[in-house]
Amino acid sequence: MTNDLSDEEIASEIRRISPDVIGVTSITPSIYAAERILEIARDEHPHAVRVLGGVHATFMYKQVLSEAPWVDVIVRGEGEEIVIELMRAIDEERWPEDRRTIKGIAFKEDNQIVATHAAATVKDLDAIEPDWNILEWNKYTYVPLGTRVAIPNFARGCPFTCSFCSQWKFWRDYRVRDPKKVVDEIEKLVTEHNVGFFILADEEPTINRKKFVEFCNELIARGLPDRIKWGINTRVTDIMRDKDLLPLYREAGLVHVSLGTEAAAQLKLDQFNKETKVNDNKEAIRLLREADIFVEAQFIVGLDNETEETLEETYKMAWDWQPDLANWAMYTPWPFTPLFQEIRDQVEVFDFSKYNFVTPIMKPKAMTRGELLNGVMKNYRRFYMQKALFHYPWRGTGFRRRYLLGCLKAFLKAGFARTFYDLGKAGYWGPQSKDKVHFDFDENRTLAEAQVADWESAADRAARAAERREALRLQGKERASERKKASAAAALACGGSTEQMAENA
Ligand code: B12
Ligand code: SF4
């Protein structure tokens, strides 16, 4: 992704390095590219073991191993511990014979697809130390500030279970690192690599408030906020909970929060199982702005019931809430999510290379895909045009103004320079082209089932425990009512009433 290498360049790199093992990552939109790299590896360097990892391969291993039989092994879930076992087996020449003894992998054996027992999640995140030295740092720039950027990890997982999201299921349980160790890592990024901005890779870094506050205090104690600023994704509910702590977060250098506001209508938030309220979205945005933290509101659009009116509503809502930035993502039906299971009959496109939050994968009942895209682009145009003219240049003088203008520059670079997911290639050049947009979906791509049954998350366990508690409660209630009936009957039998107990009671 960083170097945009051609197949030939990849082939020549593989020949140059001549590795024993080749590993590739895969999120859903990159799956075909990942498969292709391993295909090149097979042709160029057939003796290397070809390994695939990442969220898509984890849940879609049957489809991947069927359509790309040159993939030797898929590592499912978190790779750090599994890969050590895999490497040992390869190194000690126990591969492939011993593969059934390694937990958390999938492979093809005698034309059968085999998945070993799921491995546990990495319990001691502090034992993992990323090697930041291997990056070519001049290629990683945070455009809004023109500084080097890194994406370290503070916590993994999310305790919520939003129906459209693939992440809570993937990470399974919530774990957080020792805040001091994370700050050690950030300090090194600043001093050794001149990094000026970091984004936490986490789904929800703030849920463990105590650790997050420790993290902020440690950054402040080491004087790092003068040298590095940072951003996170998090939930509206955490911002409401932490309203008194927002000044501390800002002091620690947190300048950008991307909020999963998702929808302008409560019905949609409930459908997403978001466990938030529309009014809370507005309040969380206000609180962040008050604390001088840039806030980005994320909307998900493009479900079956989307119309021009509902898109307009999200725009009005965005304008009313006044976040600094707004983002309209197309609903993307990852096959391993609960919402996909509900609406699978409506999904027609299984060309995963287009599953990128920008291309409309779903066609709403009352709109064409071109109209949907145009509605979204209209929201972007209006929102950023007004912000650019009336807000960004006039908001504050120092950092705030520089940052907002930087964000605008990044947005323009990606959007109007048409690198924004090849909208130009799809023939989208503005409203006049909305009826001529061609997404060129590969129609030969068909759905295969996701393999989620053996992948138990903490939320699944909690749901099962709640079901058990509910069943016990109902049983208890039933028994109590039986006892009540029996004692009433006994009272009747003793003649304490006007009528006698029925024979068969
Ligand atoms: C940072 C980030 C980005 C950065 C990436 C910068 C960079 N170069 O690192 C940017 C902004 C560029 C980006 C872009 C996109 N992203 Co992004 N991104 C993330 C984010 C927030 C963190 C990624 C990360 O570092 N994770 C931490 C690492 C440790 O996790 P990991 O990559 O999954 O790796 C672990 C395992 O999967 C496994 N593993 C992974 N690969 C391999 C390979 C081998 C060989 C092995 C053994 C194991 C293994 O082991 C690893 C360690 O445990 C994730 C969400 C998340 N928390 O993961 C979304 C996420 C990955 N992004 C997503 C998407 C959709 C996109 C975009 C399409 C969005 C867009 N329209 O721009 C593009 C696609 C880019 C592309 N062409 O591939 C989705 C993917 C969903 C899915 N089901 O596939 C995610 C999950 C977010 C979401 N909302 O759901 N992204
Ligand atoms: S809160 Fe965010 S990460 Fe957690 S399940 Fe919902 S969308 Fe996914």
Image (cartoon, helix red, strand yellow):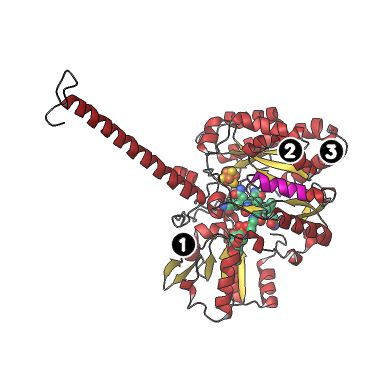
Mark 2, residue position:
246
Query: Dot 3 lies on which element?
Result: helix
Which callout, 1 or 2, points to the residue nearer the camera? Answer: 2
Quarter of the picture containing the N terminus is bottom right
The CA distance from mark 1 to mark 3 is 50 Å
Quadrant containing ligand 2 reads top right
Q: Position of residue 372 (x, y in %)?
A: 59, 37
Q: Position of residue 495 (x, y in %)?
A: 16, 22
Mark 3, residue position:
401
Quarter of the picture containing the C terminus is top left
Label 3, residues with CA under 10 Å away: few <14, some 14-19, many ≥20: some
Mark 1, residue position:
62
* First-in-chain label (1 vs 2): 1
The CA distance from mark 1 to mark 2 is 45 Å
Question: In this orientation, does residue 75 appear?
Answer: yes
Above/below status of 359 relative to 366: below
Residue for point 50% across, 36% down:
271
The response on whether ligand 1 sits within 8 Å of label 1 is: no
Label 2, residues with CA under 10 Å away: few <14, some 14-19, many ≥20: many
Amino acid at circle 2: Leu
Q: Position of residue 11 (x, y in %)?
A: 66, 72
Question: In this orientation, does residue 418 appear?
Answer: no
Which callout, 1 or 3, points to the residue nearer the camera? Answer: 3
Report the span colored magenta: 203-218
Residue for point 14% across, 23% down:
500
